[in-house]
Amino acid sequence: MTTPAAESFGSRLRRAMDERGPLCVGIDPHAALLADWGLSDDIAGLERFTRTVVEALADRVAVLKPQSAFFERFGSRGIAVLERAVADSREAGALVLMDAKRGDIGSTMAAYAATYLDPASPLFSDAVTVSPYLGYGSLRPALDLARESGTGVFVLALTSNPEGAEVQHAVRAGGASVAATMLDHLRAENAGENAAGAMGSYGAVVGATLGDTLGAAGADLSIGGPLLAPGIGAQGATAADLPKVFGAAVRDVVPNVSRGVLRHGPDAAALRASAARFADEVREAADAGGPGAR
Ligand SMILES: O=C(O)c1cc(=O)[nH]c(=O)n1[C@@H]1O[C@H](COP(=O)(O)O)[C@@H](O)[C@H]1O
């Protein structure tokens, strides 16, 4: 990849949030959902489920987040369905955040980065989720390729599951928690784009389920980039929790709902109505966060 992108992911995301409402809907074809939709747990069921979600939502939600594992479990034919979903969603105007949660030593990370963030790849997406367990610096190839290709990277910081605290709240020599350290790295990464007046392209994943436990991690959420907030719906959080969890950063939050929307399928109108309800609730919650929060 040699041609620099015309526009950064952060500014494309901000526009999509403003125009379509700040909602990310997950494409998570759980076996149980396929069954609920009357579909078989095979490649035909996967394809029908995925096509239904993309056709119902890609022309209206800001972000679609396919969860790669649900496609990988069907092997190469599952990946082919994923490729098609990415291309069709982008074509219809949704930004695609590939939920792959990759993380490896830098030289291997470069291959993961090429898979999702190089425009020449069949899985080219607008952004990807990554895990910093091998150290933030190991993510450098993805961070650099994102800058070059106008894509984004979301780093797991404070995940929505209760087990995450064992690692993420751990305190480093010097006193900062691991999560706070990741947020500090992201703030530095976004500084250039922020100085140019744009939201940064480097996001953090911070669960909407965390209630007031964020204080325990000493987390400063003002990273100048987006905050992906999974946990609304099936994991028990609601849009009304967002101002409490995120404070002034609520305007940079992109809440994710997967099963909470998907359970309304396969009827396309019901999927759309559910996504619209969540988008309204989230917008109201963000507005309640007060002005100047950006
Ligand atoms: O990175 C993620 O998307 C993610 C991070 C996290 O901390 N918690 C979390 O639930 N997720 C993903 O967000 C989605 C949540 O799905 P629902 O619980 O069905 O809304 C799943 O695809 C998870 O893999």
Image (tube, rainbow, N blue to C red):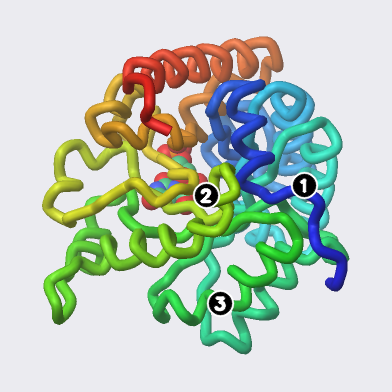
Residues at circles 1 and 3 in contact by the CB criterion of under 8 Å: no
Nearest the camera: 159 or 152?
152
Nearest the camera: 217 or 239?
217
Q: Nearer the viewer, mark 2 or mark 1?
A: 2
What x and y, as percent, mark residue 245? 25, 35
Q: Residue at x 64, y 71 (%)?
A: 144
Q: Nearer the viewer, mark 1 or mark 3?
A: 3
Earlier in the chain: of badge 2 and badge 1, it is: 1
Q: Nearer the viewer, mark 2 or mark 3?
A: 2
Crowd rating for badge 3 (residues with CA inside 10 Å; few <14, some 14–19, many 20+) = some
Task: Tally the marks.
Answer: 3
Name the element at disc 2.
helix
Quadrant into which the N terminus falls: bottom right
Q: Is residue 79 visible?
A: no
Asked if 142 appears above or below 25 in the picture, the reply is below
What x and y, as percent, mark residue 244? 23, 29
Figure quadrant of residue 243 = top left
Q: Amino acid at mark 2?
A: Asn
Quadrant into which the C terminus falls: top left
CA distance for labels 2 and 3: 19 Å
Residues at circles 2 and 1 in contact by the CB criterion of under 8 Å: no
What x and y, as percent, mark residue 121? 83, 65
151 relative position to 122: left or right: left
Q: Which residue is mark 3?
A: 140
Q: Is residue 219 visible?
A: yes
Q: Residue at x 72, y 63 (%)?
A: 117
Q: Which residue is mark 1?
A: 86
Q: Amino acid at mark 3?
A: Arg
Q: Residue at x 76, y 24 (%)?
A: 59
Nearest the camera: 263 or 247?
247
Q: Amino acid at mark 1?
A: Val
Any mark on residue 194, and which?
A: 2
